[in-house]
Amino acid sequence: MKAIRLVEIGKPLEMQELPIPSVGNRDVLVRVKAAGICHSDAHYRAGTSSVGSLPQTLGHEVAGVVEEAGSQVTGLEIGDRVCLHYLLTCGDCTYCSLGSEQFCTSGRMIGKHCDGGYAEYIAVPARSAVRLPDEIPFEHGAVLMCSASTSFHALQKTRLAAGETVAIFGAGGLGMSAIQLARALGALDVYAVDINPDKLRQAEKYGAIPVNAAEDDPVGKLRELTGGRGVDVALELIGLPQTMQQAVQSLAVFGRAGLVGITDKPFELYSYAELLGREAEVIGCADHLLHELPLLLEFARRGQLDLSDVVTRTVPLDADAVNDVLDALEEFGGDVRTVITP
Ligand SMILES: [Zn+2]
Ligand SMILES: [Zn+2]
């Protein structure tokens, strides 16, 4: 089979011919129908994030069709449409039994620690294959496995309840999912904070109230818009100390700030005024969980989470085409998604 692989850090990915992976008793072989090209893949290629041993087939956002199932696989049959949870976990360790399998002691990520979906086929434990409803295109199923699920997990971690208000800092790819999912979970008002008027217009299309941080101080504006109360949940999806601080400062009494964006810089907070005095919380959010995927997929099936503005382009399984997309992600950032359709 064909696979597009990272052979050397800092070099373009290469097409290699590999044997079709063999399937263990509890595994399924999936014929890849869609593999999202993620900004993380550009980091792996550049060496700014580490990967397992090389060469490695990249691609952690994968959807396809079950081609073969191991003898002990139940609940999945040949021909089933599936999307893949990118974390391969044991299911038995302390963290797995607590339902927090993103910290599985033997967890591996596809397309990072083991071969991923930039290929014609991939074999994974059946436990990681989630049925993809017919109404959801493969391209959307693939992207649902990364950015949308990260946003969904952050809304779960911050315990968003129906009737609450939410501010989303960063109206990019993650933000567009977060806005729609917050509404699907029953948020009363969702505010989108960004400095880019185009992104704010798109956020408005999905039902968010725009707050242009280039024109107004977002903390003051959010207080004004909530009658002085502040928001119950603020998600920081950008990864800047300034917006992390703003997210905390925007909180109401008992508010929760979920930090999703990554930075190595510290941010400042005033413990009494911003946390203790409001019994507010700052919550770190990482990855997502297998058990969160069925509800996420159901929101997508019902059209409450629409990814048609996010997945804008497809390319064939071709090394040059994929390297071009990764070059563009490095240059312009990763708000819209290109998906490989082998
Ligand atoms: Zn991704
Ligand atoms: Zn485990």
Image: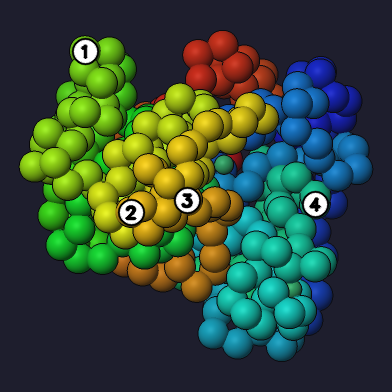
Compared across the picture, whether 234 is left or right of 76 comes to: left
Q: Position of residue 289 (x, y in %)?
A: 54, 65
Are the residues tagged 3 and 2 within 8 Å (C-beta)?
no
| Residue of label 2 | 278
Q: Amino acid at mark 2?
A: Arg
As rendered, which of 126 and 17 lies closer to the eye?
A: 126
Q: CA distance from mark 3 to mark 2?
A: 12 Å
Which tag is nearer the camera, tag 3 or tag 4?
3
Q: How is the image coloured?
A: rainbow
- Label 4: element kind: loop
User: Residue drawn 80% across and 75% down?
Assistant: 24
Return the x and y of residue 146 as percentages of the image width and height. Answer: 52, 48
Q: Is there CB contact under 8 Å for labels 1 and 4?
A: no
In whole angstroms, how far apart are the C-alphas of marks 3 and 4?
A: 33 Å
Tell me which corner region of the image, top left, top right, bottom left or bottom right, holds residue 274: top left
Q: Are marks 3 and 4 in contact (CB under 8 Å)?
A: no
Q: Which mark is residue 215?
A: 1
Amino acid at circle 3? Val
Instruction: Say which of marks 2 and 1 sits in front.
Output: 2
The residue positioned 91% from the left and 43% from the top of the image is 53
Q: Quadrant of ligand 1?
A: top right
Residue beneath label 4, please?
114
Which of the marked residues, 1 or 4, is nearer the chain's N terminus?
4
